[in-house]
Image: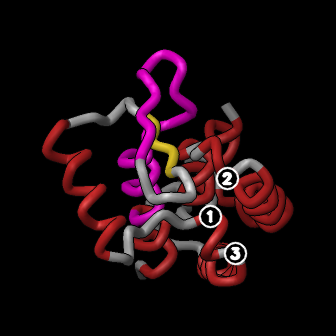
């Protein structure tokens, strides 16, 4: 995977980090409905060096990209409706189901093998990216 190229490779993360981070932020905005949590984890990989120390330049860029595209990238469950849905997912331990909301607010669940991605897993990845971007 692409993450393996940058894992514990500070030189590559410094040299190519900005280009890769900008591209994956763009992809998350463009294909956000697919909830690709692996793309978020790649962003976390690019913020840490081989000793798991933060790379401030990449951290700043990720925070900037996330703040500019918050509504498209982040799934943080800020409203009461979203929070109650998160609790339902946690209670059901439904980590592989993908949830889509209709305009009426009614939820539609897709089964695991064909699901676009787990909303709960994506939420956890969002939180991890935010933590990594603020550490150090």
One can see residue 105 in this view: yes
Give the alpha-carbon distance from disc 3 to disc 1, as whole Å.
Answer: 6 Å
Q: Mark 2–mark 1 contact, CB under 8 Å?
A: yes
Q: Quadrant of residue 2?
A: top right
**Magenta run includes residue 10:** no
Q: Residue at x 40, y 65 (%)?
A: 127
Tell me the element at label 2. helix
One can see residue 11 in this view: no
Image coords of residue 28 (percent x, y): 70, 55
Instruction: Tell me how many marks there are.
Output: 3
- Circle 3 is placed at which residue position? 69
Tell me the element at label 3. loop
The span shown in magenta is: 107-127
Image coords of residue 135 (percent x, y): 41, 78
Quick one: 4 or 112, which is closer to the camera?
112
Tell me the element at label 1. helix
């Amino acid at each position: 995977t692409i993450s393996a190229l940058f894992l514990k490779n500070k030189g590559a993360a410094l040299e190519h980090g900005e280009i890769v981070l900008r591209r994956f932020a763009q992809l998350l905005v463009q294909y956000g409905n697919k909830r690709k949590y692996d793309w978020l984890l790649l962003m976390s990989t690019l913020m840490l060096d081989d000793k798991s120390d933060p790379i401030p330049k990449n951290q700043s860029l990720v925070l900037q990209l996330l703040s500019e595209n918050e509504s498209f990238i982040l799934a943080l469950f800020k409203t009461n409706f979203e929070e109650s849905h998160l609790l339902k997912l946690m209670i059901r331990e439904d980590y592989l189901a993908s949830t889509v909301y209709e305009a009426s607010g009614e939820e539609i669940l897709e089964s695991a093998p064909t699901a676009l991605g787990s909303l709960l897993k994506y939420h956890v990845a969002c939180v991890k990216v935010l933590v990594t971007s603020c550490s150090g």
